[in-house]
Amino acid sequence: MNKKAVSWVVTVGMGIISLIALFPILLLLLSSFRPSSELMRSGISLTFDWADLNLDNYLYIFSQADGYWTWYANSLLISALTIILSLFFSSMVGYALAVYDFKGRNLFFGFVVFILMVPFEILMLPLFQMMISAQLVDTYAGVILPLIVAPIAVFFFRQYALGLPKQLMDAARIDGATEYGIFFKIMLPLMTPSLGAMAILQGLGSWNNFLWPLIVLRSNDMFTLPIGLATLLTPYGNNYDVLIAGSVMTIIPIIILFIFFQRYFIEGLTVGGVKG
Amino acid sequence: MSLDQPAETGKSSLVKFINSKNVVPYVLISPFLVSFLLLTVYPAVQGVIMSFQKVLPGQVTFVGLSNYNRIFNPTFLKALTNTSVYVVLTVIILTVLPMLFATILNSKIVRLKTLFRASLFMPALASTIVAGMVFRLMFGETDTAVANQLLNWFGIDSVDWRFNAWSGMFLMVVLCVWRWLGVNILYFLAALQNVPVELYEAAEVDGATIWQKFRHVTLPFLKPVTVFVVTISIINGFRVFEESFVFWEAGSPGNIGLTVVGYIYQQGIQQNDMGFGAAIGVILMLIIFVISFIQLMLTGAFKRGDQS
């Protein structure tokens, strides 16, 4: 009886804490149905007139906010390319480190691990200078290039590939498969769970990335979502409709993906605790 | 390989060469290696070199230590102090609370674990910008914003959240904690799976209280993950930028929200003083390296932190 009571109290307590965690997201959702002028004047408020709730912000964003959808398309494209390129590059490396014994392997791996500790903030000014020289400022390539180097993904793929069954490789060799055929046709498919986790890590990192795009992107029609939304975040802004509905539209696809691919999210986001 | 048609034997020996086990690994690592050298190693070295230079468009001059001599000015010290306070607060909160919540979520007495875990994790999906926007509107200056409404209900006066030093720091810390709490809970939950159930049972037989079980059974198993969480929290804490930008954009009143990275951005990008910005970056890197090194010493090996 006593144990049951404790169980109830603890469960309710965790429930309240979970609600507190969800509270800002719920408030964001709710506020997106409020008149944007009121939102600008009074902030996100607990007291409001339920009768005032309407779809105006969404109607506006879907009919008249072309700029917002340009940011959206930019973010989608940049995230997709980042995922594809960084996964392609780093999965090959992680795999090579795990299954082949080659000269310089340990040195190379040690170096990759060491570079994991170098914060991006020390690289960004020289990178910016390079982008200026290469005339890549304000281009997709300028944003994407630094993101395709993902030492953390190399680390993760190596870890995963160490557990792959090596007998398969020998069997395939006897059947006349090339080493590359073995990787792409046999081993890479076996690495799917790790690819999923890293796709989430890289994708979410790129989707939410702020500092680098802020530096390298200049014109409004090249902005990604976080940069674009941040420009609306001024006290004198008259675009709170785009800001609030646009924020919801930024999070919702991620939450839907999270519900379906929870495992990959959890694995991806807990790898080394890299800040996204 | 698909240029013109080489002699049959020549082609097959080339294929053989590229396919030999001595060559394959180098082919596989080469795209990464090139991008790694060009986009990480070179900028890292260049960053250090730049910190001894004055960089103007088309004109770079070595200025020795002059950038470093300028660093320890009141603005930088303010940024460093802010950042350090932020680091201390976030590290403590983001270690103690996740440890507590993970222990609770791991125990038998709580129900709906999966739901709670997912709910606590969900804030990590929001970008700092979107989350910060929501917090900014929740912690608005008006009496009608959520935070002040709650204070007023308890009979406390409204606060100008973004205009006091203490509340500015509070906003940044709350935003960070809100986003990362769930992720850190997962680290601790993963570590808790390593605690053998028999130990709890043995402790129960010996009549241990809940606290004694936590202190003497659970806690020793949590040491590696705790060191790991503390380290990444320190490193990520020193890298704080967005949590400040989202509340004050480029400048906060009296620099109450200025961080070290914010100062790099301000000097290196906005003021176009890249050499000076790079020097601040080097100092930041040294701080992070020293802390990583200390962590390495404490745990024996870097990989002993159960990441992956």
Image (cartoon, coloured by chain):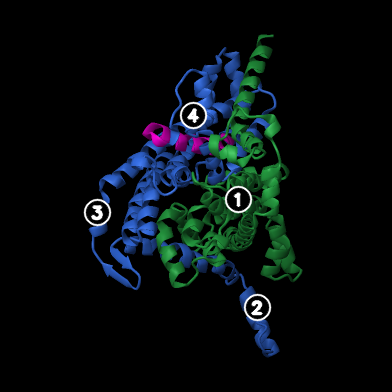
Chain colours: A green, B blue
In the picture shown, does residue B266 fall above or below A132?
above
Q: Earlier in the sequence, mark 4 or mark 2?
A: 2
Which residue does the numbered mark 1 point to in the structure image? A204
- Disc 4 on helix, strand or loop? helix
Can residue B308 be seen at all in this image of the molecule? Answer: no
Q: Give amino acid for label 1.
A: Leu
Numbered range of the magenta stretch? B163-187
- Disc 3 on helix, strand or loop? helix
Q: Left or right: B16 with respect to B274?
A: right
Q: Left or right: A241 with respect to B271?
A: right
Which mark is in front, 3 or 2? 3
In the picture shown, does residue B257 fall above or below B209?
below
Which mark is in front, 1 or 4? 1
Q: Give amino acid for label 4.
A: Val
Count of picture labels: 4
Picture coordinates of residue A94 (x, y %)? Answer: 58, 58
Q: Earlier in the sequence, mark 3 or mark 2?
A: 2
Which residue does the numbered mark 2 point to in the structure image? B16
B169 falls in the magenta region: yes
Q: Left or right: B253 with respect to A18?
A: left
Residue located 67% across and 17% down the image: A8
**Split into 4 quadrants, where in the image is the C terminus of chain B?**
top right
Relative to the observer, which residue lies in front, B95 or B1? Answer: B95
Picture coordinates of residue B237 (x, y %)? Answer: 43, 42
Which mark is in front, 3 or 1? 3
Determine the CA span between mark 4 and mark 2. 57 Å
Which residue does the numbered mark 4 point to in the structure image? B96
